[in-house]
Image (cartoon, grey):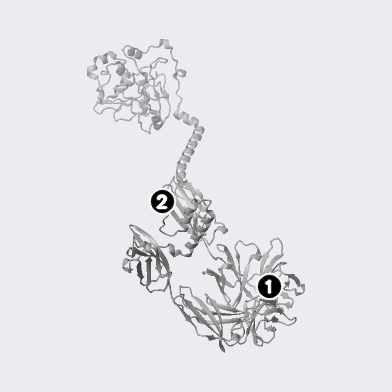
């Protein structure tokens, strides 16, 4: 098999399956040789070589490389077909240099890559065949190391460090040389690639005649420092000392004794200085004390001027007096100094709680730990003494390990004192006076003002007595019920108090009271409230409506609970909106809990909401709907009054009718006498009735309509009402039967009589029945109803002429007929007089001739007699009529 290239690993694996089992051993050896030869000479399988291989150059310089083709490439391709790439990017051909058919050079100017890959390829048709590549690094020459320093641990090691300068970006080796200056040939070296190197025991002999130098070297060059002499005693550093004990001496105040042990491996016969550090754990204050040791392994010292009963922490370090390096700090140990009796008073305060059921009072005492600095010792407890102000012999004593106590006192004034005690003694007494139950304290503080800043709560007050220089500021949560939950603080020589906001809960209302103090007496406090931080209320007020009117409504709401206000409520805003209308609002002060909305639309549904606001914002409550009325109370009142008045009138009228029933009956429904029951005359039997008048009427072809006979109202004068009578009737047959009335009447005026006495004479004694009653003119008018108009005919003269000479009247129709237009009448029918004759009012024409008196008399005397019990017979009822007075008289 003719192979162009040497056998590779891949070729060996391809040929391995065709080997027979017989030649297995020899073939295995052959393959092993091939693999070894391929690993041993990798360039033997490449088609080209690159020179120099893996170069390291100075950064910023020019890079020059050569690609050399091997002989097996010469027949097909030559160096002119070689291309170059830098980090897979083609290098411009102008940087190429073809030396001959097998060599191509490349030059890259200003090479700044720290690491880059340069590749040589063969251009074959449209393909680029890789030939060989190399890695190129650039960097800097090493700087000369500086600042050589060493630390010597006796019989342990010698370690030196230096500053190598700038980073070279290339592999750089450092060599530390230790030379004995008296014998320069005795050199010890230490090789490293870092900036530190050590000589370990036993190669760290102690001598003060050594010098040290450092050499730095890489592919670009090397640099070597001068030999720097360093005496070992000046660079000695040893292990930290060990503290044996820290203790106090009984009976000696403000003192501690410290004892420690030095390490064993130190340069002998050298002067040692140790530094004792003690730290006050109460104030975290640190101080130092230096102690000298002369070749001693044990050191000790006394710490004086310490605080009483205070814990101290102690640590120690040491140094050779010629060395520049201290040892490390030893481990810390703590101890407390002796106690002393407390030197300061406790901060005492009280809360007085009166009892309504008894005369006794609960006095809640509170006090704070001692503020003396430095503290005297650990407090073991407190002694409380109290007695009535005027009875010092009745002193009582209580002890407590807590900082509070409740005393049950009567109404008398008391003196209370509290002292703190420890193992060394008691503190001075803190005294307060509790006033009697009926004692009134004076008000010395005029005004208290609160404010807040970003970090603090500030309270200021104005006192009426500036000479009072001590006050107590008390503060607690508004809803705090526990007297011991209150906080207080004494203020001296100031009317201003500040406290950190962190001591107040946000969104919680605090009560603040300022008490003036004069001696052990406490004056009346001044009170205010404050929020350290506010936010808008957690919920809004719930609206409710009171009395709803036509154009107004009263909106009510309750205050928000104190836990949800989150600040001081500054105002309330009422939002109200009609259905499908524009929203309106009204704002009121925080002390207003109801408001009357006016100018509302009648019979309209509204939605109302209340918003409570503080400095941080506002929150709207749940909506409430209501509807205005169509009518308000005034409208109903104005409607009800006429109705009530009408009802009262009807009731009054009904009562009057009941009480005056007979009088009203007589007026409205008068009793009309029945002629048949009259005893004045004796009525003939009906069968014997022979009324000539009716006979004359029956002789005609028409009948009489009795419904046409009505009672006619006539206006008579009022003077002669009682005696005047009107008798006026007619048969009304001339119209109904067509009888000619021409011969009956032809006069200027028709009247019965104009005098009351003559009216009485005109009635014949033979008249069977006359009905009289006394009616006023108005009563008579109310009993009449309108009737129909009939043709004006003569009635009164009919009595005296028509019956005596009927034939004559018929013959003289043409001569004596009356013109119809000369008369007019109005007939009215009275329902209460159904059997009465027609009573007529004649309007006499002024053109007619005036009748004579004789004619009237003859007519009045010709009245026919009445026939009792005869149908269709007319009769006359006289109801206080008055004859009309006319100028013409009968």
Quadrant for the C terminus, please. Answer: top left
Residue 669 in picture, x, y percent from top left:
45, 27
Q: Within 10 angstroms of label 1, few (less than 14), some, or many (20 or more) residues?
A: some
- Return the x and y of residue 106 as percentages of the image width and height: 35, 69
Q: Nearer the viewer, mark 2 or mark 1?
A: 2
Whether residue 614 is visible here, answered yes or no, is no
Element assignment for label 1? strand
Q: Give how far across and how far down residue 315 sits, in percent.
A: 65, 79
Seen from this angle, which residue lies furthest right?
393
Q: What residue does disc 1 label?
A: 433
Q: Is residue 389 above or below residue 35?
A: below
The local secondary structure at tag 2 comes to: loop
Q: Which of the marked residues, 2 or 1, is nearer the chain's N terminus? A: 1
Q: Residue furthest bottom?
A: 182
Please give the residue where the numbered disc 2 appears in the rendered image.
Answer: 582
Q: Nearer the viewer, residue 411 or 637?
A: 411
Q: Quadrant of residue 772?
A: top left
């Amino acid at each position: 098999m003719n192979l162009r290239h040497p056998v590779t690993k891949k070729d060996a694996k391809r040929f391995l399956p065709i080997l027979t089992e017989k030649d297995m051993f020899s073939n295995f050896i052959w393959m092993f040789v091939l693999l070894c030869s391929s690993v041993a000479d990798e360039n033997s399988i490449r088609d080209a070589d690159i020179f120099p291989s893996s170069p390291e150059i100075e950064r910023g310089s020019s890079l020059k490389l050569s690609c050399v083709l091997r002989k097996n490439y010469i027949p097909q391709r030559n160096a002119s077909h070689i291309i170059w790439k830098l980090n897979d990017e083609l290098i411009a051909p102008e940087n190429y240099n073809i030396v001959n058919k097998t060599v191509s050079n490349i030059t890259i100017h200003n090479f700044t890559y720290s690491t880059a890959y340069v590749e040589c390829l063969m251009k074959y048709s449209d393909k680029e065949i890789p030939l060989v590549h190399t890695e190129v690094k650039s960097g800097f020459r090493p700087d000369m190391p500086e600042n050589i320093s060493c630390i010597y641990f006796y019989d342990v090691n010698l370690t030196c460090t230096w500053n190598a300068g700038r980073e070279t970006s290339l592999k750089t080796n450092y060599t530390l040389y230790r030379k004995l200056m008296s014998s320069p040939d005795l050199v010890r070296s230490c090789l490293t690639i870092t900036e530190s190197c050590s000589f370990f025991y036993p190669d760290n002999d102690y001598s003060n005649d050594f010098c040290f130098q450092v050499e730095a070297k890489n592919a670009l060059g090397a640099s070597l420092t001068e030999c720097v002499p360093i005496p070992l005693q000046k660079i000695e550093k040893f292990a930290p000392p060990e503290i044996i004990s820290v203790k106090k001496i009984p009976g000696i105040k403000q003192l501690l004794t410290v004892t420690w042990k030095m390490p064993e491996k130190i340069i002998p016969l050298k002067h040692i200085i140790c530094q004792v550090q003690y730290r006050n754990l109460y104030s975290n204050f640190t101080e130092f004390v230096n102690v000298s040791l002369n070749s001693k392994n044990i050191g000790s010292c006394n710490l004086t001027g310490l605080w009483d009963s205070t814990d101290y922490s102690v640590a120690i370090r040491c140094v050779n007096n010629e060395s520049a390096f201290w040892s490390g700090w030893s481990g810390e140990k703590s101890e407390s100094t002796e106690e002393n009796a407390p030197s300061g008073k406790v901060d005492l305060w009280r809360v007085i709680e009166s009892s309504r059921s008894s005369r006794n009072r609960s006095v809640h005492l509170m006090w704070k730990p001692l503020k003396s600095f430095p503290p005297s010792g650990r407090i073991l407890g407190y002694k409380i003494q109290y007695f009535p102000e005027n009875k010092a012999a009745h002193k009582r004593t209580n002890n407590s390990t807590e900082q509070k106590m409740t005393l049950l006192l009567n109404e008398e004034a008391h003196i209370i004192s509290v002292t703190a005690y420890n193992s060394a003694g008691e503190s001075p007494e803190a005294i307060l006076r509790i006033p009697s139950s009926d004692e009134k304290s004076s008000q010395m503080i005029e005004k208290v003002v609160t404010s807040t800043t970003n970090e603090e709560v500030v309270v200021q007050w104005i006192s009426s007595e500036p000479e009072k220089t001590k006050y107590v500021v008390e503060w607690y949560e508004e809803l705090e019920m526990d007297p011991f939950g209150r906080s207080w603080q004494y203020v001296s020589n100031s009317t201003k108090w500040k406290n950190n906001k962190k001591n107040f809960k946000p969104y919680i209302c605090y009560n603040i009271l300022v008490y003036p103090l004069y001696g052990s007496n406490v004056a009346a406090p001044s009170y205010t409230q404050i929020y350290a931080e506010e936010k808008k209320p957690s919920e809004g007020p719930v609206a409710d409506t009171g009395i709803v009117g036509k154009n107004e409504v009263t909106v009510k709401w309750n205050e928000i609970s104190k836990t949800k206000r989150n600040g001081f409520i500054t105002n309330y805003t009422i939002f109200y909106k009609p259905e499908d209308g524009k929203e309106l609002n009204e704002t009121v002060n925080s002390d207003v809990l109801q408001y009357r909305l006016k100018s509302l639309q009648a019979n309209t549904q509204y939605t109302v909401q209340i918003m409570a606001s503080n400095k941080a914002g506002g929150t709207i409550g749940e909506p409430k709907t209501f509807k205005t009325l169509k009518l308000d109370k005034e409208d109903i009142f104005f409607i009800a009054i006429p109705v009530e008045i009408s009802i009262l009138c009807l009731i009054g009228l009904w009562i009057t009718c009941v009480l005056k029933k007979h009088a009203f009956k007589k007026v409205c429904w008068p009793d009309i006498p029945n002629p048949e029951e009259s005893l004045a005359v004796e009525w003939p039997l009906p069968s014997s009735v022979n009324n000539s008048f009716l006979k004359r009427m029956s002789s005609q072809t028409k009948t009489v309509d009795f419904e046409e006979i009505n009672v006619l109202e006539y206006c008579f004068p009022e003077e002669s009402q009682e005696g005047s009578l009107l008798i006026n009737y007619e048969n009304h047959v001339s119209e109904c039967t067509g009888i000619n009335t021409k011969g009956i009447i032809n006069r200027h005026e028709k009247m019965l009589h104009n005098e009351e006495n003559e009216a009485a004479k005109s009635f014949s004694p033979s008249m069977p029945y006359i009905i009289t009653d006394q009616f006023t003119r108005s009563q008579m008018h109310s009993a009449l109803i309108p009737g129909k108009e009939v043709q004006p005919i003569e009635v009164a003269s009919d009595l005296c002429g028509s019956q005596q000479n009927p034939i004559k009247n018929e013959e003289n129709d043409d001569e004596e007929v009356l013109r119809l237009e000369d008369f007019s009448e109005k007939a009215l029918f009275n329902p209460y007089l159904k059997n009465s004759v027609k009573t007529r009012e004649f309007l006499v024409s002024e053109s007619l001739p005036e009748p004579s008196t004789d004619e009237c008399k003859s007519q009045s005397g010709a009245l026919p007699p009445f026939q009792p019990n005869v149908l269709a017979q007319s009769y006359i009822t006289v109801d206080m009529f008055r004859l009309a007075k006319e100028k013409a008289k009968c």
